[in-house]
Image (spheres, grey):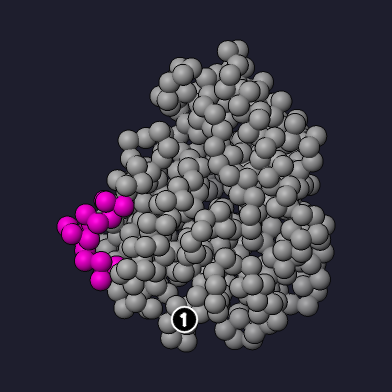
Amino acid sequence: MAANEELLARRHQAVVRGVSYATPLFADRAVNSEVWDVEGKRYVDFAGGIAVLNTGHCHPHVVAAIRAQLDRFTHTCFQVLQYEPYVRLSERLNALAPISGPVKSILLTTGAEATENAIKIARAATGRSGIIAFTGAFHGRTALANAMTGKVLPYKKPFGPPLPGIWHAPFPIAGSSVSVEDTLSYINFIFKADIDASQVAAIIIEPVQGEGGFHQAPPELMRGLRRICDAHGIVLIADEVQTGFGRTGKMFAMEHYDVQPDLICVAKSLAGGMPLSGVIGRAAIMDAAEPGGLGGTYGGNPLACAAALAVLDVFEQEKLLDRANAIGDKLRAAIERFSRANTLVPVSGPRGPGAMVAFDILKQRGSDEPDAEMTKRVTRVAHENGLILLSCGVTASTIRILVPLTASDDIVDEGLAILEKCLAA
């Protein structure tokens, strides 16, 4: 098999530059939270395919479910020949979603499809077009999803003007100059200056911003958004593409709040690495679109549905919500220790619920000035030392940890030991 360097050279010749890469490595095989590259080197995986592998690489129950479905059929298109796994998965998602009353689902393929379809459904239900999103948000890279994303570089700058009808309110981050009151006031300014509330179809928010740096929406913000939506007939959409399926210590991050969304976007860890996404929501809103107005050739692929049903089984059988909180406690304790160590690169304390944990790399100890260059160096040194580690954040200075929830304590400890070594280097 070709070496990493040779494959990287071929990649540069064959694959577009716009698809970035976090490491120069090429995977050969993976089990649970360990990966081996094409040269046989082993790595501890603290990235989980960007929060896709909450049940780990190649979980045997998930693999067995895919194999069983593979022997039956791989594709019919649900709109042509229906199949029971799509219906059964929708039933299970409807029962799990933190939304009271009748609930329905649609299954799709990617996270961007989920957010775009949620907007289509909200527009059909309200007869309105306006959308409010937040700074720092990431909702996908397709045209509408990209317009809702609250970060210009690298997502927007070279692609021309975004689609109209979308406004961004500042997201309140702890320790920043923006408070919850500021955010809610800004939304009222939007209603006065840009679009009347009666023309707004939806407000879309990540309960914990993913690419934005793992900042959790304060409870009072969620309550304020729910009040605004109820007062003006606006649909509240929770983008749980990254937070969903146990990452925050609950099946859905919205379970951390005392208010409910109208629609929930899901993807990533839903199907253990198979491409599957969806929108779950109040039946009266979800049924607003006419037959044929929603769907997609590959949406709810039978192999992916089989995998997702197995993922939900694993969560129950292995008590992964409890495991998420235990892993999160271990990560936070280690990061707190890193933040107090004078022998390491200056870092902030940890943040994020459950096992969705991050910290910032800083210019100086005791300051909050971000250090993007040092962050790049730490992630590079990490993979050189056998740890797959990702950065994120609006200042590109956040280290995020997305280790599979099935990882053993020994593996988590090994990864943290490598991380500490990298911060010392």
Q: Residue at x 42, y 25 (%)?
A: 368
> Residue lying furthest top in this view?
343
Q: Is residue 219 left or right of residue 233?
A: right
The dominant secondary structure in magenta is helix
Residue closer to the observer: 148 or 384: 148
- Label 1 sits on a secondary structure element that is helix
Question: In the image shown, does 376 or 417 lie closer to the viewer?
Answer: 417
Residue at position x 64%, y 58% in the image: 251
Answer whether residue 203 is magenta in the image.
Answer: no
Up-down relation of residue 151 to residue 292 (above or below): above
Q: Which span of residues is magenta-colored?
A: 184-200
| Rendering coords of residue 54 (x, y %) | 68, 51
Residue 354 on image: x %, y %: 63, 45
- Residue drawn at the location 56% of the way across and 33% of the way down: 350
Q: How far across and how far down the image is residue 45, in percent?
A: 69, 40
Mark 1, residue position: 284
Q: Is residue 297 visible?
A: no
Residue 308 visible to the viewer:
yes
Q: Write the residue at 46% across / 69% down.
A: 262
Q: Residue furthest left?
A: 193
Counting other residues with Cα less than 10 Å from the Cα at mark 1, is it few (<14), some (14-19), or many (20 or more)?
few
**Residue 206 in the image: above or below residue 424:** below
Amino acid tagged 1: Ala
Note whether 157 is above or below 399 in the view shown: below
- Image-quadrant location for residue 99: bottom right
Instruction: Residue 245 in the image: state x and y as whole percent.
Output: 64, 57
**Where's the N terminus, which quadrant?**
top right
Please indicate whether residue 52 sits to the left or right of residue 365 in the image.
Answer: right
Image quarter (top left, top right, bottom left or bottom right) of the C terminus = top right
Q: Nearer the viewer, residue 12 or 217?
A: 217
Question: Quick check: is 189 in the magenta stretch?
Answer: yes
